[in-house]
Amino acid sequence: MPIALAPFLIPLSALLLSSVLFGAFVWMAGATPSDVYQSIYRGAFGTWYSWQNTLTRAAPLMLTALCTALPARLGLVVIGGEGAVVIGGLVAALAGIALLDAHPMVALVGMALASIIAGGALIGLVGWLRQARNVNETISSLLFNYICIAILNFLVVGPLRDPETLNKPSTHHIGETHMLGYLGDSSIHMGFAFGLIACLILWILYKHTTFGFAVDMVGGNARAARLSGLPVRKIMLLVTFMGGAAAGLAGMIEVAAVHGRANASLNAGYGYEGILIAFAARHHPLAIVPMAILFGGIRAASDLLQRNHDLPDATSLVLQGIIFVLVLASEAIYARMAAKSGYKS
Amino acid sequence: MTGLALEAINVSKRFGDLQALDRVSLKLKKGGIHALLGENGAGKSTLVKCIVGFYTPDEGEVLLGEHQQLISNPRDAHDLGIGMVYQHFTLVPNMTVLENLVLARPRLPSIIDWNKERMAIAERMKGMPFQLPLDAPVNHLAAGEKQKLEIIKQLLLDVKVLILDEPTSVLTPDEADEVLGQIKDMARRTGLAVLMITHKFREVVLYADDVTVLRRGRYVGSERVGDVSVEKMSEMMVGREFSGTALAREPAADQGVKLAIDALTIEDDSGLPAVSNLSLTVKGGEIVGIAGVSGNGQRELVEALAGQRPTTGGEIRVMGERYRGERQELLRHRFHCLPEEPLRNASVSRMSVAENLGFRCFDRPPHSIGGFLRRRAINAYAQRLIAEFKVSPANTAIPIGNLSGGNVQRAILARELWDQPNVLVVANPCFGLDFTAVAEIHARLMAARNAGAAVLLISEDLDEIIELADRIDVISDGRLVYETTPQAADPIVIGHHMAGHAGEPHAH
């Protein structure tokens, strides 16, 4: 296999193999694989309506994927996107409530800043614990997820609850006029543009700036980076902060564009799915965009699978899980190819 | 005890376009040391890998002993009693000497009776050329002791053929003499056949019985060591007479102190003092050499100077200003550092050669403007450096980890010697390099000195220090214990100070 094509061919074959395995799974569950795939296609990409659904769901996924993909460049495996979404959404809702009387633009900027700072601080703390106390970043970020979810649940059920929300305890509403708008006359909210722009900016930052170069040095060999006088700690803190900020912004989008309030819906697995997308995209900010759309499509088609094929609720999770395992397994192929091409005389 | 222990006949091996070995033959006799001499890339390692069955030769064969047994895989080689000591240690650092020795056995019982093993190994140790404390953890051993442990590990397996890959590259001259002397005695006594890869003529002349020379994968010849001069050997090795031109040391213009270390204290990884209250100054146009046995604080000192390790006391001043290893200071003062093991310490193996060469310049014009990289400018810069320093292959796009060790060294040297350093810290710059590369690196260090750089050379190779330095300091247990000049230097006296036997010159 030519090396230049490997980054495309390997994930593609992993996806193909995943669909074969998933086909076997739905067949055992009593459905016809070809019909199921047709439904997924229709639910995700078949019509303009389903496209809008898909892209709306892809918006937070792009941002949560960045939460894993950015620190990955430093060799860190951060899985705290879910916690950052939750805390970002919660803080955004608080900011929105505090700015109820402000101009909508001011309110939105305030909410966005609050969510960026909260999410960034959370994952930045993970980075700090790693370099100052040598705490494993994967474990700490995972545990922070539970802490953030618990904080959210405590606050929306307790002190911050809007008494009018009966079925689903939530905070007060941020005000209809302060909601994030839509792109043109579609039903895709502005969050999709946020995600797209964030991926693009971070790609440029990593690929074309001296900052990205320094991140590569620190991630590739911190000793060499120190030899060159780079502030390794600062760079680590900054990169983990940026990752958390992206996921925090995803939480703000969910509040400001979808729910209007902070509640348990923030904890809908966008953060966890982002991990999967980051790995499937091999932590490349631009490759995250199509991967997020693909996974957004699977989410969007999930209802249709239940309705049309009597498949259980978790079916789309099975597909995600199969893809994740195979994509991770295919990483080994890169390692083997690198070993082969690295022949030394 | 004579007779052939092993014979390689017309061995050829090709990797892609590269003919790594071209009909190479070698006869290894029992009871002596056979040196395998050649420059980097001459095919020494490939030949040895064919002998131990790691590679299968494309043509030719390797036969062992009188029965002419064929070796075709590592298992055969092992079963037939071939043992190899690699250039890099293959010990488990956090296990003890005893555990490492037991672990090396190919077939271990499921339950190990440690008391029995300890007694058996202690008994057999008595017949070994060197002694080691069985309960010492390997990570507390000095490099020389680790090398001895590697050799004992093989000898305990009752090998008949022992292959040593540059065994003295990590040893002090004293240690090297001891190790090789003992191995030679052992070979004489027991009929062990030793094949030693090296490029140090001194070791060949003093310890080897026979020598085989390879050049660019070709067999040049085999000789009895007594019958051939060093000049002849170097000619065989590089294909031309080696002119040992003395380095032009220009009289130093007094440039003032450029590097000052004042009462520096540094801790090692476990928080114990590695360097205590160390002070020294280096003037422009001067090379100060720090000699010492490895593990006496040199690594921590270099790491502190390189900004890779915090200091716990004292200070470093560069060009009269306090120095903390921050990038702005490093670039402003033109402070350069060439640590040992450049792949581990000074480069990012997965980044390209061009990027690695750009570490000092990527964030300043014209290599970047307004925070945006100009890769074309970085690439052009790298092209100039690799042309000047003859890095091979001359391809700046491949990851630097794909280059051979010598070429990584060259590339990093290019980066650190470029741009007229004011201060240059160099640690063991010639580790494992062949002698043309060594001569070139020495000449470049001298040229940097002559151009006014303050050079601090930290090396375990005493000959190198005596050749290059204007002043020599000896480090022992984290302190500078002795100072001399190359003119007055007596290797024996320096050796005693290195060993920490300052007041008792006969305590050897």
Image (cartoon, coloured by chain):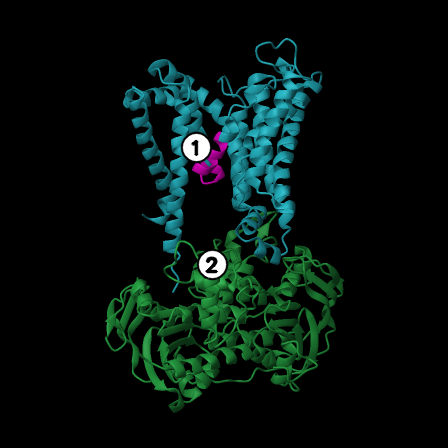
Q: Amino acid at mark 2?
A: Ile
Residue shown at 47% from the left, 53% from the top: B350
- Same chain for labels 2 and 1? Say yes or no: no
User: Start and end of the magenta stretch?
Assistant: A273-287
Looking at the rendering, in which quadrant would you find the C terminus of chain A?
bottom left
The answer to the question of whether label 2 and label 1 lie on touching residues, with beta carbons closer than 8 A, is: no
Q: Tell me, for residue B400, which label it has, or none.
A: 2
User: Front-most of B347 and B93?
Assistant: B93
The answer to whether residue B227 is left or right of residue B499 is left
Tell me where residue A183 appears, x and y as whole percent: 52, 21
User: Front-most of B96 and B412?
Assistant: B96
- Let me know if residue B113 appears in the view: yes
Residue shown at 44% from the left, 60% from the top: B103
Q: Tell me, for residue A257, which label it has, or none.
A: none
Give the residue number, with chain letter if any, for mark 1: A291
Chain name for mark 2: B
Q: Residues within 10 Å of mark 2 (few under 14, many from 20)?
A: many
The image shows residue B51, relative to residue A340, as above or below, that is below
The answer to whether residue A192 is left or right of residue B65 is right
The answer to if A224 sits in the magenta stretch is no
User: Front-most of A61 and A106?
Assistant: A61
The answer to whether residue B476 is left or right of residue B443 is right
Rendered shade, chain A:
cyan
